[in-house]
Image (cartoon, grey):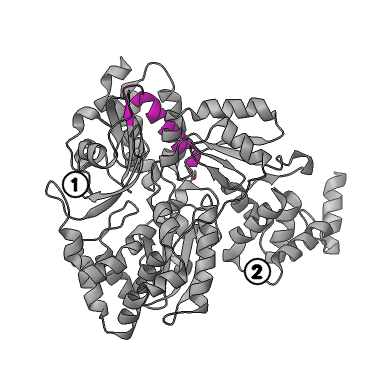
Amino acid sequence: MDKVVARKRNKMRGEKHGRRVDPVAREQILELLGDKPRRRDLLIEHLHLIQDNFGHISADHITALASEMKLATTEVYEVATFYHHFDVIKDPHHAPPELTIRVCDSVTCQLNQAHDIIKQLETKYEGSVRIQPVPCVGRCEQAPVAVVGTNAIPHANVDKIVTAVDKGEKEAVAPDCIKFETYKESGGYQTLMKVTSGEISRDNVIKTLEDSNLRGLGGAGFPAGMKWKIVSDQPAPRIMAVNIDEGEPGTFKDRYYLEKDPHRFFEGMLIAANVVGTESIYIYLRDEYAGIRKSLSHELEKLIANPPVELPHIELRRGAGAYICGEESAMIESIEGKRGMPRLRPPFVAQVGVFGRPTLEHNMETLYWVRDLIERGADWFTSEGRHGRKGLRSFSVSGRVKNPGVHFAPAGITIKELIDEYAGGMLDGHKFYGYFPGGASGGILPASMDDIPLDFDTLNEYGCFIGSAAVMVFSDKDKAKDLALNAMKFFSHESCGKCTPCRVGTSKAVILMDKEAWDQPLMKELSQTMSDASICGLGQAASNPMQCVINYFPDELK
């Protein structure tokens, strides 16, 4: 009763309810933000500043940031706790250790004893260093992978990790990519200037894309030329969003190309912006690519300082550890500073995207090939292909092969041809047993089905899809059942929680799959429900590996 009376008195006095702003936290936030805009869409960027500076985000920081940005404290808290890379704490005494070592435990890292590394590190550091199992970090060809701070350790073992810690090697290093000056000297941005000046017409560019049948290489496979036409027909102002949140376990092609030649991507991006007529570009980069973020930021600064043509407004935005933001509308929500939850459609992103404006959304790799297609012609692309398919694909190959990596190969190539001709064959002592043709969500097929052309639409009848062409190969020393469970744990962890079929379905599937004997009728019913009723592709495709084990690996379930 006394508390009720006190609240009434406070209300009468005009005093605000809720958590009061701590003056120390306020000063810290003011110093961090400096003269940066307090716009709502920059909330995640500002949360990164706090996380990077303090190693965590306290309740006082959230309250102070909310006050400074004129947002509800609950709204800031909801966003901060949605993303895995923000450590939100209520009590300063419960802050995580100064250093975190993240060890990937997704499919290919599991094949390479990542769990043993985790156990050994936990024993060694006994809580003085945080050892955190994490989903895929986009380096599957380097499995097992650990990240010390932001410094990725390829082909990791305990000795390599401990050495990095002892030497203080905790910061990501920018890759040695082709620099702005070198790119321009070798003819870079000439094609962009021709398109901008009208020497190469916009209609001709779109026709080249259509003739090449270039499709979205992030996984959706929507025809690029058609997408440009649709967006360009929408009312101005138009916006462009580039998705480099490459979070599908098994894929790393975007990272591979950006580490080598970022300006080829920039040029393709700017050609698209010119043809479609977009006034702003937002590049959304996954947070795990800290080294690439350094190089992209540096090279983008040089491009803006010495523009070959008049440039639209460009911003590089930083993801925060949410696989769901690979879905285009969830990424747009994140760009707007919100929780990355998929939108219901219609309206479609091309009509109502970033800030409610028509938006051209593309995967990085799709834009990477635009310059080459314009310069070489559609025939360069369509002349390649096997087994009735046309084009080229960047296959991210990992697992039990001698030469894992990105292999630029003909569309329609079979898994047998890909392994033998490009990946160097199977590892010694390993016999080909099965493969994921399209990352963790693309399903699982046995070695006996090694003659299926790998391309868009060719795998649908088998309950699989190629997606971003992330091919994970496993051998007779592995079990499809175990790998499917690994994939489902990933989906359960990464579900945004917006829809019940995905949120509940993935967690229930993990429980069912973790049992020695599978309740196949119940699992089939669950799979169908998730596929039919989930809002976005995560829930719709999450059950593919489980269903494929039932269909194609029955001997493992006996």
Q: Give the residue pinned by disc 1.
A: 412
Asked if residue 370 is positioned above or below residue 87 in the image, the reply reads: below
For the point 35% across and 20% down, the residue is 519
Determine whether, in the image, residue 411 is placed left or right of residue 10. left
Label 1 close to label 2 by CB (< 8 Å): no
Determine whether, in the image, residue 362 is placed left or right of residue 245. left
Q: Is residue 279 visible?
A: yes
- Where is residue 215? Give x, y as percent: 26, 58
Q: Is residue 487 magenta?
A: yes
Q: Give the residue pinned by disc 2.
A: 38
**Quarter of the rendering containing residue 538:** top left
Specify start and end residues of the magenta stretch as a single range: 474-496
* Crowd class of label 1 (few under 14; some 14 to 19; many from 20; radius 10 Å): many
Which quadrant would the N terminus be assigned to in this image? top right
Which amino acid, by three-letter code, is at mark 2?
Arg
Determine whether, in the image, residue 552 is placed left or right of residue 159. left
